[in-house]
Amino acid sequence: MGLSAYFDASGKEDLPIITVGGFLADSDVCDDIKADWDIATNGRVFHLAEFGTKDCKLGSREWDRPARESFLKRLATIVNRSGCYVISASVEVAQYHSFIQTSPHAHVNGPAFSGCAQACIALCEFLLGRGGTHKQNLEYIFEQGDRQHELAKMVNEWKEIGDSDRAGLRSLSFEPKATTLLQPADLIAGVVQKCLISAHSALPCFDNGLSRTALFNYQHHYSTDGLTAAAVGGHDHEHCWVINPQTFKVLDRISTEFFQRHPEVLEKRLAQSPFKPK
């Protein structure tokens, strides 16, 4: 049975936080999520940023507040179900920019979105390794246009390097925003991002000296209507993280050790118009 992980982003480089969120599940669970989601949305495209506006394809602008809240929580429970890992990684943009300016491996990490996306992939691999299922086939799916080259390089290297036990077991694709299973990922990313934007307005900095901070630590900023809890409950202690600068340092060390073992990969990467921070 194959596994799939769908991810989407929320936030831009001019905001204090960027989040990538989504879910990991096997094919049967993904099929169930898709079927229930299509019923809930009547096959129309859902996008959290448009919800409640004139651009919403569901007509939610005409709904009253309780109807909107109830609908969003219904969507949250469709994806946050048994057999599904809800996953997110968020970074403080200023902290990430400070790191990437001096990183010897900016070509690996890319901008803040790419760093978050790679953290989500790393978390998926950790979860599979812990569960002893890392030798199953797994496809990562992101929205088209989302820093495709950095992510593609990483997954392609797994396929090319023979000493990796993931070689040949991982694939990566980029699908249109209208893809049904990218819509739950959009919801998760947006809900987490809203929580952390609220938390950031009350805190000068998220960095607590640890490598990462569980989303649950910002529970005070979960939405009062219960949507945040519905979307991430059960996953906000171990699967949803704010990534702190200490993690960036560890990633640089891992990259250095990797390129020492595989200098041919570094040479190839540097020849591919690598990302350079402004």
Image (cartoon, rainbow, N blue to C red):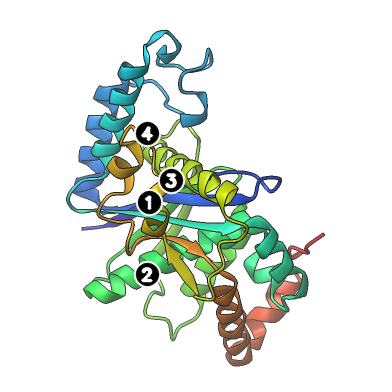
Q: Residue at x 55, y 45 (%)?
A: 197
Mark in front: 1 vs 2: 1
How much space separates mark 1 and mark 2, taking CA atoms? 26 Å
Q: Which residue is mark 3?
A: 221
Q: Amino acid at mark 4?
A: Thr
Q: Which residue is mark 2?
A: 125
Q: Is residue 179 above or below residue 153?
A: above
Q: What quarter of the picture does the N terminus occupy? A: bottom left
Q: Residue at x 24, y 37 (%)?
A: 78
Q: Which residue is mark 1?
A: 219
Q: Is residue 128 above or below residue 234?
A: below
Q: Amino acid at mark 1?
A: Gln
Do the residues bearing badges 1 and 4 touch, measured as CB atoms within 8 Å?
no
Give the class, few, some or many, for how many residues have Cα within 10 Å of label 1's Cα (few <14, many ≥20): some
Residue 96 percent location from the top left of the image: 66, 64
Residue 104 percent location from the top left of the image: 73, 79
**As drawn, is 159 to the left or to the right of 102?**
left
Q: Which residue is mark 4?
A: 180
How much space separates mark 3 and mark 4, taking CA atoms? 29 Å
How much space separates mark 1 and mark 4, taking CA atoms? 29 Å
How much space separates mark 1 and mark 3, taking CA atoms? 5 Å
Q: Secondary structure at mark 3?
A: helix
How much space separates mark 2 and mark 3, taking CA atoms? 29 Å
Res. 182 in view: yes
Do the residues bearing badges 3 and 4 touch, measured as CB atoms within 8 Å?
no
Query: Mark 1 or 2 closer to N-term?
Result: 2
Do the residues bearing badges 1 and 3 touch, measured as CB atoms within 8 Å?
yes
**Among the 4 quarters of the image, the one containing residue 62:** top left
Q: What quarter of the picture does the C terminus occupy? A: bottom right
Residue 223 percent location from the top left of the image: 39, 38
**As drawn, is 235 to the left or to the right of 164?**
left
